[in-house]
């Protein structure tokens, strides 16, 4: 039998589950950075995002965040703009939902940005055929069920 020369298997690569729910300091944008909302995931560590300045950019998830911080559609992220490529950017930081609400309250994000858009949408009675319509229940509706 071969000797085990490694330092562990896939569980070691996953790392310890560090508590991300602890409060961290809110990071604001600096020069050469902008806020963006993820429109769709493209795969291979890339996504398409709409920046606050109105430009749609192809964003690359940096290696430190790759497979550690999961980014989904509708998330608010901080992107680093490139000097030499205006249509591309790098995702620096993903804001948690409470941090995104704080950014909107401080006036950093415009009012037309909808937070938590990728989670569920209210059912409007129309069926568009894709089968992903969600119904929003109120407390009294749940009591009747």
Image: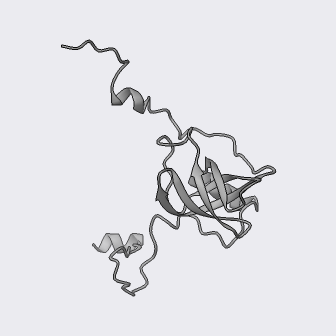
Asked if residue 92 lies left or right of residue 144, the reply is right
Along the viewing direction, whichever of 145 and 39 lies nearer the viewer:
39
Which residue is found at the position 46% from the left and 64% from the top? 119
Asked if residue 82 lies left or right of residue 75, the reply is right
Along the viewing direction, whichever of 29 and 48 lies nearer the viewer:
48
x then y, percent, for residue 67:
46, 42
**Label tally:** 0
Which residue is found at the position 26% from the left and 12% from the top? 3
x then y, percent, for residue 143:
32, 70
Which residue is found at the position 59% from the left and 44% from the top? 62
Q: Is residue 132 above or below residue 95?
A: below
Look at the image and tell me in which quarter the C terminus lies.
bottom left
Toward the front, the furthest residue is 84
Q: Is residue 127 above or below residue 116?
A: below
Image quadrant assignment for residue 140: bottom left
x then y, percent, for residue 136:
41, 73
Look at the image and tell me in which quarter the N terminus lies.
top left
């Amino acid at each position: 039998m071969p000797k085990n020369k490694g330092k562990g298997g896939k569980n070691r690569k996953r790392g310890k589950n560090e508590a991300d729910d602890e409060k961290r300091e809110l990071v604001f944008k600096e020069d050469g950075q902008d806020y963006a909302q993820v429109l769709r995931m493209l795969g291979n560590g890339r996504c398409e995002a709409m920046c606050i300045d109105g430009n749609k950019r192809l964003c690359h998830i940096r290696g430190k965040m790759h497979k550690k911080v999961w980014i989904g559609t509708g998330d608010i992220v901080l992107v680093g703009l490139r000097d030499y490529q205006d249509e591309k950017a790098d995702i620096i930081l993903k804001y948690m939902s409470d941090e995104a609400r704080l950014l909107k309250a401080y006036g950093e994000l415009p009012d037309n940005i909808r937070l938590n858009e990728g989670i569920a949408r209210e059912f409007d009675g129309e069926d568009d055929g894709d089968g992903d319509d969600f119904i929003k229940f109120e407390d009294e509706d749940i009591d009747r069920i």
